[in-house]
Image (cartoon, coloured by chain):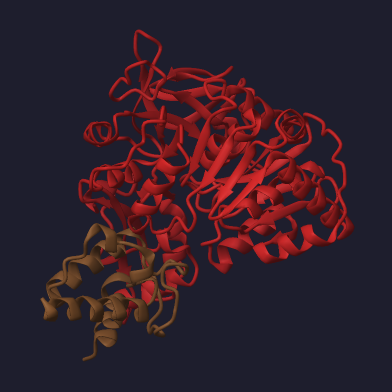
Amino acid sequence: MVTGFLYANAAARPEHTALVHRDERVTHAELLERVERLAGALAERGVAPGDAVALLLPNGPAFVTAFFAVTGLGAVVVPLNPQFKADERAFCMNACGVREVIADERQVAAMIERHPRRRLEPRGADETFAFQFSSGSTGRPKRLARTHGQLWAEAESYSFLGPDDRFFCAIPLFHTYGMGCCLIAAARHGATLVFLDDPQPFVLRRRRALELLERERITVFPGVPFIFGHLAGAPPGADLSALRLCFSAGTALAGETSEAFREAFGVPVRELYGCTEAGTLTADLDPEPVPGSVGTPVGRVRVRIEDGEVAVSSPAMTDGYSSMEELNRQVFRDGWFLTGDLGRIDDAGRLHVTGRKKLLIEVAGHKVDPIEVEDVVLAHPKVREAVVVGVSNGREETVKAVVVPGEGCGEREVIEFCRERLANFKVPQTVEFRDEIPRSPLGKVLRKYLV
Amino acid sequence: MSVTAELETFIVDEIALGRGPRSIEPDDDLLARGVIDSLGVTQLVAFLAERYGIEVGDEELVPANFRSLAHMEAFVERRRETARTW
């Protein structure tokens, strides 16, 4: 299974570089040794198969080591956004029954230093590999489990990548996109993963990113539209001639961004599509990328359109959300998952994503569920009614709360109330006060009048 | 108002509204804490141009110039130095 990739890489190419982070280069043999040592340390602390272990770590060798040590022991990895506030962390950890939290890179290093290696046994396909959270119109994020067999199936779908690829990792590994397209894909092929150290905010990392892309002769670059747009605007001169595949996901890629990047660096940006429930689903691998297309299904993924909505089926897909039987009946049907995205399939079998059925706000690459934010705003004692919407300025969305206030309710206190309870990217940037929330005759909130 | 005080006011009121602290210590790592994100940097660059006439060049758009109030003040002072000697 997935841990087996590490053994295969260490046996086949022990001296090949697995990870590059700042001045540190870690070979496949060294990575396996670190993973085995950390697994030994965790087992000694009592971590056993089935136990949930949360990771609150930035991208880097410690994340990779902890990720494979936890799953190699048969424990369940719970990668969380280190930016989450106490309430959000507590919610996710309680939902998973987290037993241990790994949040300190120095502690990981110390544990590796002190413990002998522990050989990791193969895990069963049905054992749980990870708990992940998917946002989407139900208030709090929904927990889902993916098994070793499902992650292995996702790994096998990255057949368009290879052992001599060098991946640039500028997206978070705690998110499905980075976990699949960087971590799992690189491990599957025994390729090299190069980290953009200190990746936030990306606006300040353009020079560093270009330096690494050139110096490490990066070949595969998964990113988001903002990253490609920002790089395209850099002063000319960087030689990115080794680059063969740039993927953009998370939100629609504007044609001009792809063109500007191609003009600057000679390589187009292609769209890739996936979801937390099933990992990577489609990738545009046409010799010449097709504008608006997110490509054709990868691996054994199947895609079809049901009443305008994108439905997918994949051996990498979760069995459903934990403790949400009603919702599972609605969106997981006969082996197909209804993504909530709207789309069409063209004559050549390429998927085009045309819109979104679920209410999600895209804030700088993050997906924000307005219902989750509404629940927090409504908990404020001076708020009588609240609706949260995304406001677009044409380039990006911001979060706005529309509030029917009680007595003496101010914008600042509503925002600060949210700030204490929500990750920064979810906090409304503006609060608009109204006497009433516009509703349809059936009582449905008319969000379009609030934007 | 000192440069540090002006920058603090701008960050607290304009950038961090709802996203950060009410006051900032000179050495607080604003990047690591997520107080200043990519959008925040863009706002700061515009503020530096408008308030101090400093055009931030591409080679200056690095964490070392924006990590904390102290880093930003040092950057502003350095650039003002350059402006005077020229």
Instruction: Give the chain coloured red.
Output: A
Q: Residue at x 53, y 44 (%)?
A: A194
Q: Residue at x 21, y 65 (%)?
A: B56
Residue in front for this viewpoint, A332 or A77: A77
Classify residue A220 as left or right of residue B11.
right
Residue in front for this viewpoint, B71 or A412: B71
Horizontal and vertical percent for residue A116?
88, 54
Q: Residue at x 39, y 48 (%)?
A: A211
Q: Quadrant of residue A29?
A: top right
Quarter that holds the N terminus of chain A: top right
Q: Residue at x 53, y 35 (%)?
A: A181
Furthest-bottom residue in this view? B1
Classify residue A47 as left or right of residue A226.
right
As displayed, is residue A158 above or below residue A47? above
Horizontal and vertical percent for residue B59?
28, 59
Classify residue A262 as left or right of residue A164.
left
Horizontal and vertical percent for residue B68?
38, 76
Instruction: Give the chain coloured brown.
Output: B
Residue in front for this viewpoint, A371 or A9: A9
